[in-house]
Image (cartoon, rainbow, N blue to C red):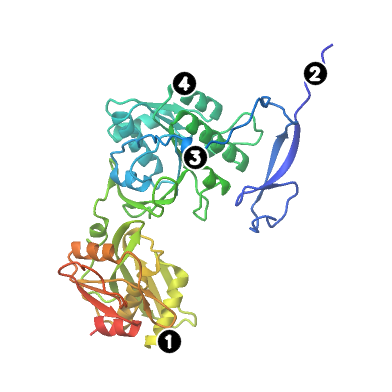
Amino acid sequence: MPRPPASPRLKTRYVCTACGHDFAKWAGKCPDCGEWNTLQEEVVEERSAGRGMAPRTGFAQPQKLSEIRADALPRLPLEIGEFARVLGGGIVPGSLVLVGGDPGIGKSTLLMQAAVLTARNVGPTLYVSGEESAHQLKMRAERLGVGESELYLLTDTNLDDVVAAIEQMRPKLAIIDSIQTMYLDSLTSSAGTVTQVRECASRLQAMAKSLNTACFIVGHVTKEGSIAGPKVLEHIVDTVLQLEGDRFHAFRLLRSIKNRFGATSEVGVFEMAGSGMKEVLNPSESFLAERMMHAPGSAVAVTMEGTRPLLVEVQALTSPTQNPMPRRTANGFDYNRLFILIAVLAKRVGVRVHDQDVFVNVVGGMSIDEPAADLAAAVAIASAAKGVAIAPDLAIIGEIGLSGELRTVGQLPARLNEAAKLGFKRCLLPKTTRPLENPPPGLTLIHARSLGEALDAVMK
């Protein structure tokens, strides 16, 4: 009588959702990365040594660098200019791109547009959805104007079947929406767990490299706004894109967080419309279109997002309060940086708002991270506190130190050219020891060494 097959041996592991490492015992704090309450229990099948693995017949041989051919495959063209800009100029064959963003922000809409254009202009494109039916995908594609193209749809969550379809079809572009819905039969854990997400991404990476098929995968985000799954997922892929924006605003920002084939921190600007995501070719003009002239508490900052200069309006409002702890609210501006600017204004300049609520807002749903917007935010707060309006033709650039000194920032020529192109006549910036070469004609530069000098120059 033949022996019955041995039942699989199961074991319990605890996987950290922050760093991706697994441990045999649960702990409140991850022993590796130090994060609290990130260990997630998973039951996995314990495989015996060598089980399911083909015998090794050899090993990879090192190659001399001069003997390796560098005939790079040309990028696939993408008619969405803002999308292509963030990718570095187009879609790289064989690349694995992770796209994250809040629910309803427009990830699937943008990727469907990219799939439609790629299928129409480049070749066969496969859109795999584990969350929507083929009928729902058809309705979205028709709304985006799919027309006649080589766009194929597949609704499946078994990654083995998905990879088999891709290997048989050999598309130019494959889109997986989303990685959290995919699963492998060889793993006993459910879809969306750390183990499944990690292994599915590794499988897609190997497939993309072997077939030279560009693959885009959609990743859900957590409550904190980071991409769900282990951090190692972002190390597996070649490019990480984040779609940002306020759901109550029309503007969407596609930000490059990691890119092996282009510049990081690059930004593409879109506007959500009924027919899909529309490119915003001049985002600075759009952000400033509804600016109220001669209003106290309004200043224009010149920031850099990757290689693109952007002009945004920074608004501030101060209001007297009877509360012992005045409110400090920042929307689109670094909260801790706001406290520093308020302290510098009070200590170095004498603008005291200790008995007032202070609100700072960056218009248009933009989020400013670089310190080059310090001076614009400080001028806006001082303008609101004193009730003095800033000239509408003034752009502001500069970082503020704790001593109240102004520090210069990088890429000044690009910032100044953008300000001049939008019709600004004056620009307030830190005084440098080396004069600027070839400043834009028609733009008067106002130099200041300290925050006090800057306020004296613009608040007369």
Q: Residue at x 49, y 33 (%)?
A: 209
Q: Amino acid type of disc 4?
A: Gln
Horizontal side of residue 337 vs 435, given as left or right: right
Q: Residue furthest bottom?
A: 350
* Classed neighbour count for the residue bearing mark 4: other residues with Cα under 10 Å, few (<14), some (14–19), many (≥20): few
Q: Name the mark nearer the viewer: 4 or 1.
A: 4
User: Label 2 neighbourhood size at 10 Å, few (<14), some (14-19), many (20+)?
Assistant: few
Question: Which of label 2 and label 1 is nearer to you?
Answer: 1
In what element is the residue under mark 4?
helix
Left-right relation of 42 to 305: right
> How far apart, in angstroms, are the residues tagged by discs 4 and 2?
36 Å
Q: Which residue is mark 4?
A: 168
Amino acid carrying label 2: it is Pro
Mark 2–mark 1 Cα distance, whole angstroms, equals 81 Å
Quickly name the residue at label 1. Answer: 347
Earlier sequence position, callout 3 versus callout 1: 3
* Mark 1 neighbour density, 10 Å: few (under 14) some (14–19) many (20 or more): some
What residue type is disc 1 on? Answer: Lys
Q: Is the C-beta separation of discs 2 and 1 under 8 Å?
A: no
Which residue bears the numbered disc 2?
4
User: Residue, x 43% and y 70% (percent of image)?
Assistant: 329
Instruction: Tell me the residue at 60%/41% (across/down).
Output: 193
Which of the pair 87/381 is nearer the observer?
87
Of marks 3 and 2, which one's residue comes earlier in the chain?
2
